[in-house]
């Protein structure tokens, strides 16, 4: 079976709206409602629960997708690791991409599966 492509950089093209965050800026907090996911255009973003960094998402990676898939509140904090430029993807855009681009949906599922496997190996 081939490796699932997890570079979502295509969504960061020049015409895409971006948001800038400085190192340490909070992008979202655990427990918040979610209306969008993000693609990292440049820099890096830490995904944290409490004082533990679960993952550092770098350029071409996505975060915040889980809440768009299941409609639940944010499950972790997202904090800029260093200066980061991100592209927001609204729920409407997300649903369009999933319905029109099967490889996008498979890529998102691949990211979520990898993260779940990683969480299953972490000590409590």
Image (cartoon, rainbow, N blue to C red):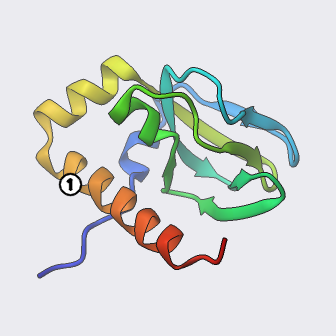
Residue at 84% over, 58% down? 51
Q: Regarding mark 1 in the picture, which secondary structure is present there?
A: helix
Q: Is residue 35 above or below residue 106?
A: above
Q: Would residue 84 be found to the left or right of residue 15 on screen?
A: right
Residue at 28% over, 54% down? 109
Q: How far across and how far down the image is residue 23, in percent? A: 86, 48
- Count of marks overlaid on the render: 1
Q: Would residue 85 be found to the left or right of residue 107 on screen?
A: right
Q: Nearer the viewer, residue 63 or 82?
A: 63
Q: How far across and how far down the image is residue 42, in percent? A: 64, 52
Question: Quadrant of the rendered structure where residue 71 is?
Answer: top left
The quarter in which the N terminus is drawn is bottom left
What is the crowding at mark 1: few (fewer than 14 residues within 10 Å), some, or many (at least 20)? some
Q: Is residue 91 above or below residue 13?
A: above
Q: How far across and how far down the image is residue 120, in percent? A: 48, 72
Q: How far across and how far down the image is residue 55, in percent? A: 63, 64
Residue at 61% over, 39% down? 86
Q: Would residue 114 be found to the left or right of residue 3 on screen?
A: right
Q: Would residue 105 be found to the left or right of residue 118 on screen?
A: left
The quarter in which the C terminus is drawn is bottom right
Residue hosting label 1: 106
Q: Residue furthest front?
A: 124
Q: Is residue 18 above or below residue 6?
A: above
Q: Nearer the viewer, residue 61 or 14?
A: 61
């Amino acid at each position: 079976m081939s490796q699932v492509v997890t570079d979502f950089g295509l969504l960061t093209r020049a015409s895409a709206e971006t948001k800038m965050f400085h190192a340490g800026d909070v992008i979202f907090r655990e427990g918040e409602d979610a209306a969008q996911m993000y693609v990292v255009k440049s820099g890096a973003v830490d995904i944290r629960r409490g004082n533990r960094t679960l993952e550092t998402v770098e350029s071409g990676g996505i975060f915040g997708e889980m809440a768009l898939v299941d409609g639940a509140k944010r499950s972790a904090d997202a904090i800029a690791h260093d200066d980061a430029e991100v592209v927001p993807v609204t729920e409407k855009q997300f649903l369009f991409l999933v319905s029109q681009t099967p490889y996008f949906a498979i890529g998102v599922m691949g990211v979520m599966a990898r993260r779940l496997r990683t969480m299953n190996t972490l000590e409590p």
